[in-house]
Image (cartoon, rainbow, N blue to C red):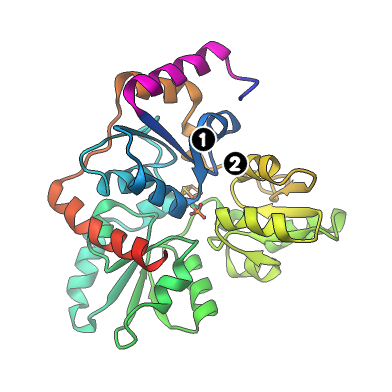
Amino acid sequence: MAESAAPSLIADILRLKKERNAVILAHNYQTRDIQEIADFVGDSLGLAYKAKETDADVIVFCGVHFMAETAKIVNPGKVVVLPDANAGCSLEQACPGPQLEAFLKANAAKNYYVIAYINCSGHVKALADCICTSGNAVKIVQAAPPDRPILFVPDQNLGSWVMEQTGRKMDLWKGSCYVHVEFTRESIEKIKVDHPDAKVVAHPECTYAVRMLADEVCSTEKMVGYCKSSPASAFIIVTESGMLHRLEREVPGKTFIAGPTGHCACADCRYMKLNTLQKLHDCLHHLQPRVELPEDIRQRAEKPILRMLELSR
Ligand code: 13P
Ligand code: SF4
C-alpha cells in the first residue's frame, strides 16, 4: 500500500469503495499511490475489457477522459466517475468530431473504413467502423476489409508504425501525442552512452526516428511482458513516467531507466497527472464528476468498441 499517502485517506477510500460497490481502474501512467490502491492497473485495452466485465455499480476511472468515456459507453447503466474532469488528451483534441464528420462527408466517394485509435472522443468513435488501441492496432488493421481504403485517426505515429508492421497503406489523420513526440533520437542516444547494454522500449506514439532506435515498440501492457521475458537486465523506457512504477513493481531485480527526461522534461503527461489520491477520494464520496454522453452517440460509439473487443480476443 502507498507509504507516502496518509493512512486515513487510504482507509477512507477503501471504506467508500465498499459502501458504493465501486471498482477502481487505473492506467499505467497514474501515480504510484493511485496504482497501489487500484483494483486493476493496465493499458487502454485491458482497462476496456475490465470495464466491460465488471459487476460493480460504480466505476472510478483513474486515467483520462476518453478512457472513462469508453467505460461509460459499454456500461450505460453504471455510474462512471473520474477524479479530475479536465484530464483530457492531446490526441483527442487533435481530432474534433465535427471536423472528422465534415471530412468524411467531403470524401464520401472514397467509402473509407475508419479505424479510430481509442484516444478520441465518443463523437469520433461514433463515426468509426472499428476502434483500436496500441495493443491491438496491428490485428485490427489486418482484419479490415481488403477492398476499402482505411482512414486511421487521430495518431499519425501509431498509424505509420502499423503501416510498417502490416504493409497496408492507410490515410492518416495528422494528430500526435504531445508527450511522445518530444522524445528525440539524440536524447536516447545520450542515455545509451551511459547504459550501452540497456534495451530501448518505446511506445508506438513515438516518432519514426525514435522507433527506429528501439529494440521493442509496444503498448504499455506489452512492455511489462517484454521486460519480464527479455534476458536483458536494464531497459530505457520511452513513454510516460508512470510506467516505471508498474515495471518496478512487477519486474523486480531489473533496472528501468526513465526516458530522456534529463534532456527534455516532458515525460509526465500533464493530463494523467491531474488525478490525485485526494481527488480519487472526493469523486468516490460525491460521485462526481460523472462521465455522461448523449444516448444516440453512445449507441453508435458502442458498436465499433464491441467490434474491437471481439476481434482482439
Ligand atoms: P496504452 O494503451 O499503450 O496504455 O497507451 C495509452 C496512452 O495514452 C499512451 O499515451
Ligand atoms: Fe494522451 Fe499522450 Fe497523455 Fe497518452 S500520454 S493520455 S496520448 S496526451
Mark 1 or mark 2, which has the lower sequence index?
2
User: Which of the labelled discs sits on residue 273, or is there none?
Assistant: 1
Amino acid type at circle 2 is: Gly
Give above or below for 168 relative to 90: below
- Does residue 31 show up magenta in the picture? no
Residue 256 percent coordinates (x, y) = 74, 47
Which one is in front, 148 or 252?
Answer: 252
Residue 183 visible in this rendered orientation of the protein:
no
User: Which of the labelled discs sits on residue 153, or is there none?
Assistant: none
Where are the magenta residues, as a range?
5-21
Q: Are marks 1 and 2 in contact (CB under 8 Å)?
A: yes
Q: Secondary structure at mark 2?
A: loop
Q: Residue at x 53, y 31 (%)?
A: 34
Residue 76 visible in this rendered orientation of the protein:
yes
Which one is in front, 287 or 164?
Answer: 287
Give above or below for 249 relative to 191: above
Amino acid type at circle 1 is: Lys
Q: Residue at x 43, y 25 (%)?
A: 280
Give above or below for 270 relative to 280: below
Q: Disc 2 designates what residue?
A: 242
Q: Residue at x 53, y 11 (%)?
A: 8
Q: Is mark 2 within 8 Å of ligand 2?
A: no
* Left or right of 269, for residue 114: left
Give above or below for 221 relative to 185: above
- Quick one: which residue is furthest to the left in this view? 296
* Left or right of 189, for residue 170: left
Residue 74 percent coordinates (x, y) = 27, 49
